[in-house]
Amino acid sequence: MCHPYGTLAVGVTYKMMQTLINGTTIWGTATDAILPLTRNESSPTPYQGAGIGSIGWYWRVLLPKGGYATFSAIMSNIPWGPGAGPSTVEPNNAMGNETIASVIKNYGVCDEEYTYSGYGPRAMGVICQFDPAFRIAQMTVPKLLCVHECHRSLFCISMAFNPITSDCQIYVVSPEDPKFAANVTPDSAYEWHIRDEMEY
């Protein structure tokens, strides 16, 4: 079951968010779509604006068999909204306790209150996507480009690179995660790199 407040199955890519922002037929009556993006409330304050405001945001994704994985958000991959009225560029904590995020049609991504109580009546949507493949990309490229491709993807949790064949493999799971160890077996010919700050 997919429901609000950061309990979605997978992270959302920049391209998906841009499609939502600019889409004309995918919205129906909804104006907002909740993302699995959450701000750590213990992050330093103030956190106004996209610079300082980028501290402490992470993806909290629902795994196919239940449970969650969290990983730091790549802030440059999030199309934050420009702010409105006296509010600065998102994330701006305009309501004082905005700890989750949503994407708003024709605006961008913004931080929101967990309860949405201060925003009045708005039609909300939720992005649901399930059963991702474990390996989401494979290409023959130099190691630096492989690392670059991993950094560009919100889905990249780990990558494997073979220095002899230049085979680059991007994964949505980690070989260190006990839930997926049987599905992603490290090959000794490959160098494995795992995204920082993963929790299993």
Image (cartoon, rainbow, N blue to C red):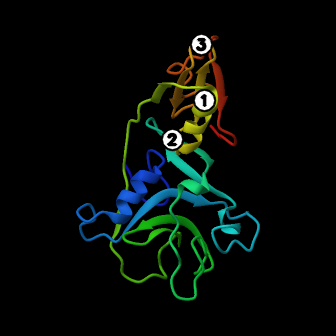
Residue linked to disc 3: 187
The answer to whether residue 3 is above or below residue 190 is below
Q: Residue at x 47, y 26 (%)?
A: 138
The secondary element bearing badge 2 is classed as loop
Q: Earlier in the sequence, mark 2 or mark 3?
A: 2
Residue linked to disc 1: 177
Give the position of the C terminus as an image quadrant.
top right
Q: CA distance from mark 3 to mark 1?
A: 16 Å
Give amino acid for label 2.
Answer: Phe
Residue linked to disc 2: 155
The answer to whether residue 188 is above or below residue 39 is above
List x then y, in percent, for residue 98. 58, 72
* 119 lies left or right of 105: right
Q: Earlier in the sequence, mark 3 or mark 1?
A: 1
The answer to whether residue 172 is above or below residue 114 is above
Q: Nearer the viewer, residue 158 or 182?
A: 158
For label 2, the crowd category at 10 Å Cα-Cα, with few meaning under 14, some 14 to 19 and many 20 or more, is: many
The secondary element bearing badge 3 is classed as loop
For label 1, the crowd category at 10 Å Cα-Cα, with few meaning under 14, some 14 to 19 and many 20 or more, is: some
